Image (spheres, helix red, strand yellow):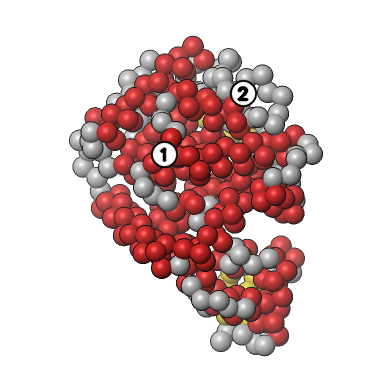
Amino acid sequence: MRAFNYSKYREQKWDSEVLGLVAAIYKEAGKQELYLKQRPDELEKLVEIARIQSTESSNAIEGIVTTDTRIRQLVAEKIAPRNRSEQEIAGYRDALSVIHESFDAIPVTRNYILQLHKILYSHTNNPLAGQTKNVQNYISATYPDGHAEILFTPLPPFETPDALDRICEEYDRVIGNLELEPLIAISVFVHDFLCIHPFNDGNGRMSRLLTTLLLYRSGFQVGRYVSLEAKIAKNKDLYYEALGASQHGWHAGDDDAVPFIKYLLGTILAAYRDFADRFALVEQKRSALETVRLATQQKLGRFTKQDVRDLCPALSLSSVEGALRHLVANGELRREGKGKNTKYLRIK
C-alpha cells in the first residue's frame, strides 16, 4: 500500500503561483472578516442562497438534477423529495447543513466521514450508506466515439478503511503541529481522498463536502456565502484535468499533487473575490434594476444572464430578466443571440 505522509510537501519549494494564491486568499479572508463586522444582517441573506447553489451544483456535476423551483423548495423549505434524484439532493442538503452548523464538532476521522456519507444517502434505500466500498471501482472516461477508457484505478476495497484512517491521522498531525500551510494540507487531503475513492457511490460529492468542512475548521468561511461547488461545476473540465494530472504515480507515492493544489487554491480565491463583489451589491439597499445595473458594470466583454445571476444571488430569475430587458431597451446593454446562446454587451 502507498505510504501517506506530507513530508515531501513540507520540504517542497513552492513556485510563485502557489505562494501568490495562498497570500491572496489570506488577504481576501481578512477583508471578509471586516465585511462581516460591517454588514452582518445583509450578508446573512447570502447564506441560504449559497446553500441552494452548493446543493444544486454539487449534484449537477454528477448528473443529479431537478428544476430550479424544486431545488429551492428542497433546500430552503426542506420539503420531502419525490424521486431518487431529489432524495440524493436532500441528502446533500442535510450533510451540508450539519457542516455549516457543527463543523467545529466534526473531527477529521474515518468514523465521521462515514457518518457524513450515511447522511448523504439518508433519504435513499442504499445498503452501503456509511460504509466503504465492497467492490473495486475505477475512474474512467467515455469519449465521443463511444469507447471508454480507465484513467485511474483507486485502492482496492480491503485497503480502503486503513487508508482513510491514515490520511486523517496524517492531516491532523500536520495541522496540529503547524507543519504545513493549512490551505496546502487541505488540498493534499482532498486529492488523496479522491485517489482512494473510498465509496461505491458519492465520492465526488463527499470530496466537496469535506473541502468545505476542512476549510471551515481552518477558519476559511467563504463557502458559507459563496458556493465553492458552483465554481467547480462552472469549470468542471479544469477540475478533471487537474485531478488527472495529479494522479500519475500515486500508488507508488511518486505523484505530484501540485496541479490539483493550484486548481483548488484558484477556486477558493475566485470564491473569495466573488464574495467581495456580492458585498458591494448588498452593501446598500438598491432596487433590482440598480443592483443588476451595478452587476453589469462589473463585467467586461460579453456576458450571460447566468453571469449576472451569479453576482445577484438574492434576486429572483424574473427580476434579473426584467432588469436586463430594461437595460437593453434603455440602450445601456446590447443583446446578442437567442435562447441559450444569448449574451449581453455593455455599451454605456
Rendering quarter of residue 39? bottom left
| Element at label 1 | helix
Q: Position of residue 254 (x, y in %)?
A: 32, 27
Residue nearest the viewer, comparing 299 with 336: 299
The residue located at (52%, 70%) in the rendering is: 282
Q: Secondary structure at mark 2?
A: loop
Answer whether labels 2 and 1 touch (C-beta < 8 Å): no
Name the quarter where the C terminus is drawn: bottom right
> Which numbered tag is attached to residue 129?
2
Mark number, residue 66:
none
Which residue is at a point 52% across and 25% down the rendered structure image? 114
Q: Disc 1 marks which residue?
A: 104
Query: How many marks on residues?
Result: 2
Residue under the point 58% across and 67% down: 312
How far from the left and from the top, in percent, is residue 119?
60, 31
The crowd level at tag 2 (other Cα within 10 Å; few <14, some 14-19, many 20+) is many
Q: Earlier in the sequence, mark 2 or mark 1?
A: 1
